[in-house]
Image (tube, helix red, strand yellow):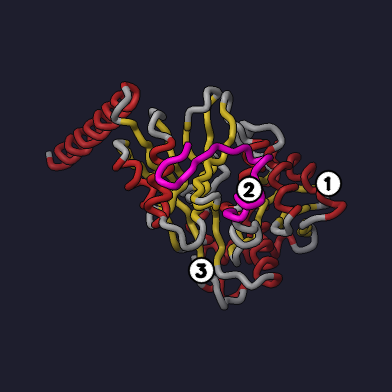
Amino acid sequence: MTQGGYSVSSELFERMPACDEALFAEPEKALFNSLLWYRTLARHAVPEKWHARCIVVRRGGVAQLALPVWCDQHGALKGSLSSHYSVTYRPLFASGVNEREAAQAFARFCERDEVFRFDALDADDVGFAAMQRALEDARFWPLEFRHFGNWHQPIAGWSFSEYLAHRPGILRSTIERKLKALDKRARMEWIREGHDLERGIKLFHQVYKESWKQKEPFLDIHGALIRAFASCGVLRLSLLFVDDQAVAGQIWTVSGGVALLHKLAHDEAAAALSPGTALTALTIRSLMEENTLIELDFGRGDDHYKKLWAAQRRQRVGVVFANSRSPRGWMQYGVSLLGKQKRRLWKQNALEDVAA
């Protein structure tokens, strides 16, 4: 499609021209904006009947904007190429481009799509704001929602002891007691790459199987993530052994000065030892000793334990776009309005009950 000097195409990740790849970040600088990340999702985390594409906006043959997306079997846009492994998503604009015009070209490209969703978004991202305005101008209704919380802790210039000093007393005392109790019995193993990688994947799978965690919807996603992270040097896989038995595992990455926790699990049979708490403390200490970090990031969700390890929370948001020119778009918009009205009435009734 070509209009106004802009052309837009839908590309397969495995066949992208090198000039388009330049819009993506290096994984060691911004993992979730990297081609490695999207290719890993496109191969190993595909929803049923969907497939991954990258919509590329060009001007004069030069790539201006890349949008990794999911499409259905008919090619209709379903939304951002994100999953419950994604911590952030953003449109990838080339430096110095006219974001408004590039976003308008994308909006014209998807004007026949009915309903699609972008999520894991930073509400303050100016690139996505430009895209949303362009879609609104193209008669798409934006239906915004709160997606998930992201707990994080700035640590630039801190030592591990300074980091602990900022944690709640109950966490500090638990760490001290559990590490003392495990002193003679436990050891942490640190795997980043090399010949131990497959062994590390096997041990993590073993721990995960014995944990409280639900079965993952995609086969071997943990192994795929670990291998991908190791291939570019961002992997930090930590394992805790008690009496030479693996009882806890955590998948971390270090990218752009941020150490991020992707997945963790511990053997329920060892819960009395608090292996998760012990391993988190040992891992963070190793990360801070090994790297110059600016932040610890505990990933998706408001799990209670994260508030002990981090003091700050970011809200990630999502937007469903409903095409006002299609019956399905109208239906989606009506469902959204009805849901908002129900929530408003529920809150009003709850307040009246309290007042009574």
> 10 Å neighbourhood of mark 2: few (<14), some, or many (≥20)?
many
Q: Residue 56 at what x, y percent from top left?
A: 53, 44
Q: Earlier in the sequence, mark 3 or mark 2?
A: 2
Instruction: State the residue at coordinates (53%, 73%).
Output: 165
Q: Is residue 161 above or below residue 99?
A: below
The tally of labels here is 3
Q: Which residue is mark 2?
A: 37
For residue 68, side relative to residue 118 (left or right)? right
Disc marking residue 199: 1
Q: Which amino acid, by three-letter code, is at mark 3?
A: Pro
The question of residue 295 being in magenta is answered with no
Judge whether residue 6 is colored magenta: yes
**Distance between the Cα atoms at labels 1 and 3?**
33 Å
Range shown magenta: 1-24
Residue that appears at 60% across and 50% down: 20
Label of residue 154 in the image: 3
